[in-house]
Image (cartoon, rainbow, N blue to C red):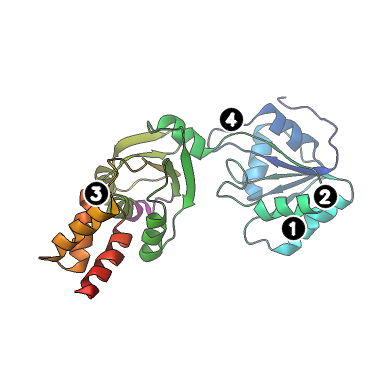
Amino acid sequence: MNHKLISLKAGLYFVATPIGTARDITLRALDLLASADVIAAEDTRSMRKLLEIHGIPLGERSVIAYHDHSGQGTRERLLAALSEGKSVVYASEAGMPLIADPGYELSCAAADAGYDVTCAPGPSAALMALTLGGLPTDAFFFAGFLPNAQGARRKRLEELTGIPGTLVFYESPKRIAASLADMHHVLGDRKAALCRELTKKFEEVRRAPLSELALQLSEAGVKGEIVVLVDRARGETVSEADVEADLRAALVDNSVKDAAAIVSESHGLARRKLYQLALQIAKEG
């Protein structure tokens, strides 16, 4: 057995679970799962399978489903268990709870009610991708999942253009091609890495500029869990006066949209902001 029964005081314990390989779970996480009075999970089937793999008996305990669609009723049920002096363990389906996974509202509610809240840390797809992706890790920004609709997705990317660190995204196989194309369109041809199926049999890391990754995925899709890393903006700083001058020059022979695109490509700046400035210049005549 890789676990032991320990005496837990009343409180909420978040537990990180493997993102692929079952043996990546920590010994402390196994101890908490074996000893907790109540187990809650984003996916009860995945939790039961994990407990079975590691030989942890449920006994008379049940696994309570708690996810983004559970609502206040389930949260109150878990808080009620805490009020009875019980220990409650919560785990999302894979990785660290709250990191693009449920648990935030439960954590806040338990802390606000005065209960102890702690965590048994462990696997995280975002951190593993940063380790393998070959991009700077001195500063990074976790952006989670981008919106489904193209307009909203590009708007969100515009908001991230000036972040002085590596950008970290989660994405699904169904949307990855469109997302990479939009990243290239909005952020420019930055260095990037596509990491998928981390810790699993078909683990893969592709390092290439966004234009190349977008082309690859437009020609052949991929399967599995995906993390995309995008380098921070590079290049020399350009003054607002120079940008405005370049826009005025571009507007002589081009439409507002094309002028913004030309200057955006030239200086590696966000196209949306340049479009608004070009529109203002055009209105001024």
Closer mark to the observer between disc 2 and disc 4: 2
Task: Check disc 4 and give the amino acid type.
Answer: Asp
Label 4's element? helix
The picture places residue 96, in percent across and down from the top left corner, at 60, 41
Query: Residue 114 has which mark?
Result: 2
- Does label 3 or label 4 sit earlier along the sequence? 4
Whether 35 is among the magenta residues is no
Which residue is nearer to you in this view: 280 or 111? 280
Between residue 110 and residue 86, name the one nearer to us. Answer: 110
Mark 2, secondary structure of its residue? loop
The spot of residue 19 in percent (x, y) is 54, 38
- The residue labelled by disc 3 is 267
Q: Give the range drawn in magenta.
A: 171-179
Is residue 200 at least partly visible in the picture? no
Residue under numbered circle 1: 75
Q: Which residue is tagged 4?
A: 24
